[in-house]
Image: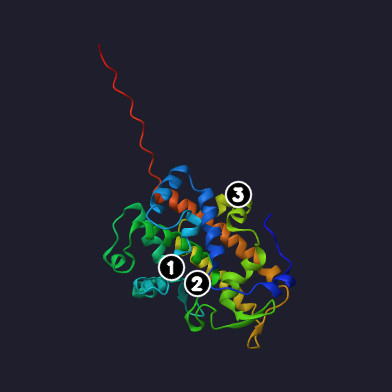
Amino acid sequence: MYKIATLLLLSLLSPLTFAFGDLGHELVCDIAWREMNDNSRTEVIKILKHTRYATFAESCVWADSVRENNDYKYLKPFHYVNVEKSATKVMTGAVCENKGCVVDAIAAYSKVLAGDTLTAREQGHYASRRHEALMLLGHLTGDVHQPLHVSYALDWGGNKIKVRYQGHNTNLHNVWDSGLIKYGIQAPWREAGAELTEDITDTDRTVWHEPSPLVWANESLTITRSIYRALPRRGNPKKLKADYFDTHFNTLRTRILMAGFRLARTLDRVLNQPLAPVETPTPVIP
């Protein structure tokens, strides 16, 4: 199993980082790589030749690496979807039609990879080269499974909620993007991805076989609502309990596994073009 580190030691040695963390995205895409079929792997390898990345897992951090590049600032709204604080369901509608959102982006980039025609509105938001669509689909599937990427505009998905976690002042979003992963998984992404994939059972594969990004987002919203309910009412920063990691890490771990498996099934669906058959030579009639 992946290494669960001693929390006290890590609180002294490891600062919290930003974004679903390179490790989180690498894990999702490495799990997907291991779960997808051979035809999909072959196609992914072909597409990656148009990028600077040697592996699918590493390519899944690209969407965060270009955030401050003016040419890609239009991607920022695609990493999340916001709802009203009272909402119990994700209603995309105007929220996604305005600037785009993670739910619609996943659907659009799936169409790009499949070679399907985008609607006029989708072309205005999501038109992309195929290799970028692959990297974005991998990244955004991870994002929509991170609960606080389906959250509230009022506090920027928890970014404005100051918390103290394992001896560090940070914010709630960062705890779920990187903090829990950093404290829970110590192996490099390739090793950790292999170990995590081994934990996926046939029952999991049956239960998790849900193709709709909107359903994935609603799952995350349910978790987000429970995260907010459990927050201390007072304090700035709010001090998270000593058992916060023990209480919540397995939830995030499961979301990473689900994201990897679902990404694999999505890629199998949109990339699963059978390899060209070997032609049988025409027999020569003497």
3 or 2: mark nearer the eye: 2
Q: Which residue occupies 69% across, 76% down?
A: 166
Q: Is residue 246 above or below residue 269?
A: below
For the point 49% across and 52% down, the residue is: 264
Q: Which residue is mark 1?
A: 102
Residue 95 seen in render: yes
User: Furthest residue to the top?
Assistant: 286
Query: Which element carries disc 3, helix, strand or loop?
Result: helix
Which kind of residue does numbered mark 1 sit on? Val
Q: Please name whichever residue, 92 or 40, is drawn nearer the observer in this view of the structure.
A: 40
Q: Amino acid at mark 3?
A: Thr
Q: Helix or strand or loop: what does disc 2 sit on? A: strand
Label 1 sits on a secondary structure element that is: helix
Three-letter code for the amino acid on which mark 2 is drawn: Val
Please give the residue where the numbered disc 2 appears in the rendered image: 150
Q: Earlier in the sequence, mark 3 or mark 2?
A: 2
In three-dimensional space, the C-alpha distance between marks 2 and 1, rounded to whole angstroms, equals 9 Å
The span from disc 1 to disc 3 (Cα, nearest Å) is: 28 Å
The quarter of the picture where the C terminus appears is top left
The residue that mark 3 highlights is 203
- Residue 36 got which mark? none
Quadrant of the drawing holding the N terminus:
bottom right
- Choose top left, top right, bottom left or bottom right for residue 255: bottom right
Relative depth, front residue between 226 and 73 = 73
Apparent side of residue 146 relative to residue 51 in the rendered image (left or right):
right
